Image (cartoon, rainbow, N blue to C red):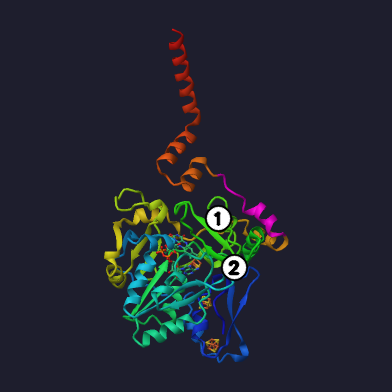
């Protein structure tokens, strides 16, 4: 029995969940990504694994009357804790209020990411926030199926390839009590590079790491910041322009190979609802107070079920219907994957032969931050800061005017 080609495998793990003979093991390749492999001795050749592979047998998702929204939670704390506008916790709260269960990605103790479930509101923060790593699915599709069969409402969130994996595992059967959310996906970075980065930060902070927030909004949502807390109460904050992991991620050096040719990065969305960042949102709608600090979600209802789930939280959410053009304008990952960099293989050669510090200098060097952006993203814009900000970016012009004024005053005094 042959599974799909490694370069196309997404690690959705539908095959592993479908094998009831424990005949599929997981191995890591040289870039630390997980892949399934069949143990021939244990395999009965039943074909279940192959039959559920969404790469070998792609299914067209059910899309009816797709609608696009700019939206955010009315609850500031919820919005602040989430990566975009806090739509995921809002929708998840509804499922929990109906006695349901919610699946999503959480950190384990070593800061690798895995799929787990919560059935209490107080546990929801574990799933909140983007973790820019591949989440291990483990046996979560089987657990979803058990809950569905017992008629419990289930909300499953994940990357589009994970939703495709779940749908394929369920043999595309329609369950009234299953709701799915796919997140717009740039691609998933190598867990090996992330662990090297954590070691580097640990050395810098001189203490073990206790908490990571990939999208800390303390200073800004628009200009991303990663924040990492250590046991000795020190905190590292790295901005979009400065942090080496974010730089390497956005330069696409260490994404999973299939991500560069992802068949799910398209408008044919896999979930009932799609969530992402509405980067192109401008402060044109009055209700979006602090949109650049707290975040705005792009929410797409892909079918009637998605519509119903969204409607269930209308009172807790501010939203405006938007056009496809505006949704697409700043979000390439909604339509097509990022290209593989030509020097990707060279990056991996260097990763294996260089110290992490040397690798950072060569591949993930800082980008120049324009002064006005630095000031804008790092200071609260109340009156005094506005004056300082104005003065800083207009320094020479202001000095020239002051000098001119002083000359006029001098001349008048002499006269
Ligand atoms: C690897 C990755 C790449 C992304 N790329 C883009 C992009 O290019 N453009 C864009 O607009 N948005 C992207 N997002 C989505 C975005 O960052 C937010 O997750 C999304 O908008 C939901 O935000 P929220 O405020 O509604 O909820 P939040 O509270 O932030 O909820 C986070 C949701 O994401 C899920 N999640 C978190 N980490 C993972 C993971 N590693 N694997 C699977 N599911 C995960 C959680 O289960 C939860 O459902 C990406 C997210 C991830 C994890
Ligand atoms: S063919 Fe059947 S037994 Fe063999 S790995 Fe696939 S699912 Fe398991
Ligand atoms: S089912 Fe998923 S994990 Fe298994 S081979 Fe196919 S793509 Fe890879
Ligand atoms: S880019 Fe595609 S294959 Fe890669 S993680 Fe995202 S959805 Fe999966």
The image shows residue 279 at horizontal and vertical percentages of: 41, 54
- Circle 2: is it few (<14), some (14-19), or many (20+) Cα within 10 Å? many
Task: Tell me if 248 is positioned left or right of 95 in this view.
Answer: right
Q: Earlier in the sequence, mark 2 or mark 1?
A: 2
Magenta-colored span: 354-368
Give the number of marks: 2
- Circle 1: is it few (<14), some (14-19), or many (20+) Cα within 10 Å? some
Residue, x 66% and y 70% (percent of image)?
Answer: 30
Residue 276 in sight from this viewpoint: yes
Task: Tell me if 40 is positioned left or right of 353 in this view.
Answer: left
Q: Which residue is mark 2?
A: 191
**3D distance between C-alphas at marks 2 and 1:** 20 Å
Q: Is residue 327 above or below residue 161?
A: above
Which residue is more in the foreground, 346 or 181? 181
Q: Secondary structure at mark 2?
A: helix
Q: Is residue 360 inside the magenta stretch? A: yes
Q: Residue furthest top?
A: 415
Residue 17 tag number: none
Mark 2 or 1, closer to the camera: 1
Which residue is more in the foreground, 8 or 125? 125
Residue, x 61% and y 62% (percent of image)?
Answer: 232
Task: Tell me if 86 is positioned left or right of 134 in this view.
Answer: left
Residue, x 48% and y 72% (percent of image)?
Answer: 105
Q: Secondary structure at mark 1?
A: strand
Residue, x 37% and y 72% (percent of image)?
Answer: 92
The image shows residue 201 at horizontal and vertical percentages of: 63, 60
Q: Is residue 342 above or below residue 31?
A: above
Residue 237 tag number: 1
Residue 268 in sight from this viewpoint: no
């Amino acid at each position: 029995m042959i599974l799909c080609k490694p370069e196309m495998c997404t690690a959705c793990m539908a095959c592993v969940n479908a094998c009831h003979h424990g005949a599929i093991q997981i191995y890591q390749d040289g870039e630390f990504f997980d892949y399934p492999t069949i143990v021939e001795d244990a395999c009965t050749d039943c074909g279940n694994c192959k039959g559920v592979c969404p790469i070998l047998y792609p299914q067209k998702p059910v899309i009816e009357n797709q609608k696009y929204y700019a939206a955010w939670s009315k609850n500031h704390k919820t919005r602040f804790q989430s990566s975009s506008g806090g739509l995921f916790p809002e929708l998840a709260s509804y499922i929990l209020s109906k006695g349901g269960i919610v699946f999503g990605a959480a950190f384990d103790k070593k800061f690798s990411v895995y799929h787990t479930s919560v059935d209490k509101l107080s546990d929801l923060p574990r799933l909140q926030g983007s973790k820019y790593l591949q989440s291990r699915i483990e046996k979560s599709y089987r657990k979803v199926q058990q809950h569905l069969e017992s008629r419990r409402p289930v909300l499953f969130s994940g990357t589009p390839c994970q939703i495709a994996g779940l749908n394929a595992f369920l043999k595309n059967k329609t369950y009234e009590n299953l709701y799915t959310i796919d997140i717009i996906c740039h691609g998933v970075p190598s867990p090996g590079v992330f662990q090297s980065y954590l070691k580097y930060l640990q050395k810098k902070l001189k203490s073990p790491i206790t908490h990571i927030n990939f999208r800390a909004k303390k200073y800004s949502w628009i200009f991303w910041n990663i924040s990492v807390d250590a046991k000795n109460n020190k905190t590292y904050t790295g901005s979009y322009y400065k942090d080496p992991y974010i730089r390497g991620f956005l330069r696409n050096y260490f994404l999973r190979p299939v991500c560069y040719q992802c068949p799910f990065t398209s408008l044919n969305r896999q979930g009932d609802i799609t969530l992402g960042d509405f980067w192109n949102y401008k402060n044109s709608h009055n209700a979006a107070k602090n949109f650049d600090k707290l975040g705005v979600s792009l929410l797409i209802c892909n079918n009637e079920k998605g519509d119903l789930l969204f409607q269930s939280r209308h009172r807790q959410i501010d939203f405006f219907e938007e056009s496809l053009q505006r949704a697409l304008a700043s979000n390439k990952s909604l339509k097509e994957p990022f290209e593989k960099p030509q020097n990707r293989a060279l990056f991996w050669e260097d990763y294996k032969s260089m110290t992490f510090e040397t690798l950072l200098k060569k591949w993930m060097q800082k980008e120049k931050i324009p002064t006005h952006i630095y000031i804008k993203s790092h200071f609260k814009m109340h009156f005094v800061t506005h004056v300082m900000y104005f003065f800083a970016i207009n320094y020479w012009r202001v000095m020239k005017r002051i000098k001119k004024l002083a000359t006029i005053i001098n001349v008048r005094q002499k006269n």
